[in-house]
Amino acid sequence: MLHIKCPHCGMRSQNEFSYGGDATVKRPELGEEISDHDWDNFVYNRKSLRGKHWELWQHLSGCRQWIKVQRDTATHEIFKTLKANEDIS
Amino acid sequence: MTQSFRLETGGLINRDKKISFKFNGKNYFGYEGDTLASALIANGVHLIGRSFKYHRPRGFFGAGVDEPYAIVQLYRNGETEPNIKATEQELFEGLEAKSVNCWPSVNFDVGAINNFLKIFLPAGFYYKTFMWPKSFWYKIYEPFIRKAAGLGTASIKHDKERYEHKYEYCDLLITGSGPSGLASAYSAAKNGAKVILAEDKSRFGGTLLTSDVNIGNQSGKEWADSIVSELKEMSNVTIKNRSQVFGYYDHNMLVMSERISDHLPETKKYHPKQRLWYIRAKEVLISSGSIERPIVFGNNDTPGVMLSSAAKEYMKVYGVLVGKKPLVFTNNDSGYETAIEFKKNGVDPIILDTRKEPQSEIIEEAKNMNIDIKNSYVVVAAQGYKKVKSADIAKISDDKEELGSVENIKCDCICVSGFWTPTIHLASQSGNKTKFNAEIDAFVPGTSKQNEKTLGAANGIYTLEETLKDSFEKGNQLSKEITNNDNKVSFPNVVEKKSTVHDKFWCVPLPKGKNYKRFLDFQNDVAVSDIEIALKEGYRSIEHVKRYTTLGMATDQGKTSNLNGLQLVSKIENKVVPAVGHTTFRPPYSPVSIGAIVGREVGKHSKPTRKSPMHSWHEKNNAVFVDAGVWLRPRYYKRGDENLFEASKREAKNVRTNVGVCDVTTLGKIDIKGPDAAELLNRVYTNAWLKLPVSKARYGVMLREDGIVMDDGTTTRISENHYHMTTTTAQAANVLSHLEYYLQLVWPELNVNVVSTTEQWAGAAIAGPKSREVLKKLFPNSDVTNEGLPFMGYMEGDLFGVKAKIFRISFSGELAYEVNVESDYGYFMWEKIIEVGEEFGIQPYGTEALSTLRIEMGHVAGSELDGRTIPYDNSLEGLLSKKKDFIGKRSLSRKAFAAEDRQKIVGVVPLDKKTSIPEGSHLVKDSNAPLPNPKLGYISASCWSVEHDNPFSLAILKDGKNMIGEKLFVMSPLKNKVIPVEIVSSHYVDPKGERVRS
Ligand SMILES: [Zn+2]
């Protein structure tokens, strides 16, 4: 079970969180003209990376904040966690 | 039976307390502190089971967790449990156990015929045999295998025992209470660190209980006892026996199973049987010691052949002799310790040492005791069927290839020592890449991967002095970094006998003309010849060899067999052992009961049960409940001997003709506040929300980004910047997360807060042509006329002194209202509604009637909004705004979603107006078409229409908009039904929606 540092609450066990997928995907602006291809990429296509990966988790059974977590998908090592409004650098 | 193998004195058992037990129906006695194994051996019982494949007789091989043989079916307090190791099971009064793998009995076993047919049962026999003809599998092969093989029988009864889970944090978790565990725990505890020390066995001390050493002028056991009693007094130390750390998971999370009651005749009141600990440790010290490994020789599975360390443990801990004419077969000094212990207890052992001229303190001591030592000697084969009777022994050449002439000597047990294998399971599970240590011929942990260090024998350190030194230091150092204390512990004076190097010999060659089975894996009957066959057949990877031969795949997971298997593969392949590599160590280290893993999450405890504030009223009024997610909702209220169908029909009919009341507390409710609340709704819902006036409700549909309908519900504008959203019962939690996702990550610029208020409000839906009359009585001071409170209107009211929210919304298609009060007043509200509604014929209605009402109205719900349909499919396309963008809108222009013959909701009526249509049935054009019959759609929901008094269903049908009036067939192969039907509009009642506005 992973140990995730919620930027709001501190170190908590994985069972308090729910997974939210790739954190680098940006939703197109409302009303933006967008091709079928690009929309498809936004909705469906994700890279299944081996290695460092920025992903979203929600501290569901805690502060309910969505957070950004940089995790190695192969080793589960967590390098960094950010608040929802902090930019991935 | 007398305990003829019990020593007069000695051991750590309590000879004052006799314990009676039963094995295979016979009564025996043992003492408090015995294991089932030690008590049986004391009673001269050496035959305990049969092996898995050849059904060869099986005795005892070890004295603990590594035991491959002595697996029994245990009976305790009316329950039974399979796969119990007799070497681990502590004796208790009234214990009963039986052999497994024997049919019909342990002494006469039909399966033993396999032993004579073993030429047909080589490696991979499962894959090669029982393959064809296919029809034989179910009828002949499988039942036979199941009866003849297997390790005991799982109980099919509900387990009445209680199991618990516990979550714990600590600075240091130490796994094993041998010398390294005690020393490191002691120095860490002295620095004030929070320490958990776990010991698998009932007694603390590990090898200190059996080794002949002196620490600080105390025996090993005395020193261990004094450390343990000191640790027990310290408030920062948790010290647990009967507790095995069996798994090392990510981020330093380890799991330990504590056997609290397994050693007692029955579980004490309020105690669990076992407790599973989830431990998050800052640092982990692995002090799991080492396991002796066997030397491989002919018939080395005969009962009476066992590990030399186990023989010593039976003498020193249990006061039991494993034999009275022992042969000790060793390639290192450990065998001598066992021989010396035999001699001390008045038994004359013979030592066969594979080494030519070894010299050490221990060997010197054995010589001085006049023990018969034969150097450069090996056991060629054990003789005897159900028990060792003699051994064929021979001299072996210096290159270990040639055997001298074979002699036979009488003996009743053969104690084998092939040196020691570090127990590296936990280290390996942590992700540590192990490395091969050629000096000890075994793998040891490499560089730490997580925060773990391995100590003592588990790390390949086999002298006590070095082990203690290293462990005191590691315990001090790691705790110092956490607590900043540095209380040095003075190092005790250690006296131990020095030993000399071991001989890397591990397998005795076969004598000419003999074809003895030489076993590697004793539980799964994997012999040297099986590995040879697997390699001959082309298996190379050790992982494949393992699976093909089943080497190391039994319940002992190869604790005594894996390394010898590797030695063999490396020899045949002419590779060094590290090049062969070892198979993966996976948790659990040793079997864990399913009960412990499940814990308290059993039956009704597997998830919470939620009840509305009106629940007890429903109970008192004969409600029959149904699970709706985690909620319990009334399905119908039984009157007399009504059944479900009759009751729900009555309730639905009463809504259509008079008035009914339904508990709708379970609906999800979300409070939305902030200046941008309307903007959020406008983006989340498909329809327009910016111009909704205060005190008005609106129905809305929300989509996922892929265009699929996520949920529907009404949202009401309570005041300028305050909205009250309702969701379906099932989607309540997902919708809240969905809103939070967009507010926190996608549109953080929106100034809106959302919070779940589902539990804050109790809700009652009052529906039917007479519902306004009920409202008038409930709220005499409010104007609830059609003008005062029009359809989709909202107002606050005073319900006999309780503040209430009144919504004029309808799910049934009738004139209807929903009244919410704070949960604590829910019961009061409900009673008042029933009271004032009596004169109008009010009846409570359950989910079944609710369903009927919505189905015949063509109102979609969960069975249509099932994660596969878009708004058009549900005839909700009128709610799609053309003017604004919203979540999922872009996806709706996908080709398939806009197809001309896109599926759409329709109504379905059977032509005979009698036959009920099973939900989930398929719609086809021709019921006699060849299979696979093209499916045009499916029945999503069915009811008995109370308006038309005939069956009615909703269906999602291909090209639904052009199918009204068509005649099709409903097919349900599951119910074996074919029903001719007509397709009608999904709005079967009041298609113009006049009633809700009346
Ligand atoms: Zn948090």
Image (spheres, coloured by chain):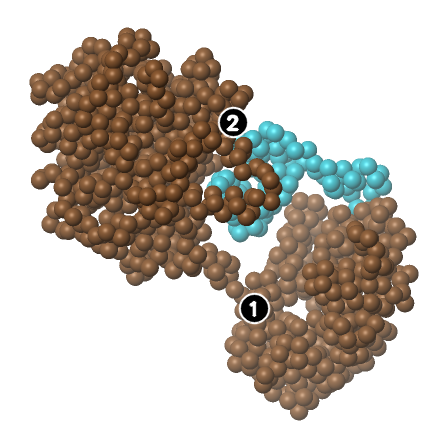
Q: Secondary structure at mark 1?
A: strand
In the image, residue B225 sits, relative to residue B162, either above or below, namely: above
User: Is B123 in front, or is A15?
Assistant: B123
Mark 1 belongs to which amino acid? Answer: Leu
Query: Where is residue B866 shown, x and y percent of the image?
Result: 71, 57
Q: Amino acid at mark 2?
A: His
Q: Along the polypeptide, which appears first: circle 2 or circle 1?
A: 2
State the quadrant of the C terminus of chain B: bottom right
Subunit under mark 2: B
The correct choice, above or below, for B676 with respect to B318 in the image is below
Ligand 1 within 8 Å of the CB at mark 1: no
Outermost residue to the top: B398
Residue B873 visible within the image: no
Q: Is residue B351 visible?
A: yes
Tell me whether the residue at label 2 lies in contact with that at label 1, contact meaning CB atoms closer than 8 angstroms. no
The structure residue drawn at horizontal position 52% and vertical position 64%, both measured from the top left corner, is: B609
Q: What residue is at 59 percent from the left and 62 percent from the top? A: B629
* Letter of the brown chain: B
Residue that mark 2 sits on: B544
Give above or below for B276 relative to B557: below
Q: Nearer the viewer, residue B221 or B239?
A: B221
Structural distance between the alpha carbons of marks 2 and 1: 51 Å
What is the drawing colour of chain A? cyan
Is B800 displayed left or right of B536 in the figure? right
Q: Same subunit under labels 2 and 1?
A: yes
Q: Quadrant of residue B442?
A: top left
In the picture of the structure, the residue carrying the numbered disc 1 is: B632
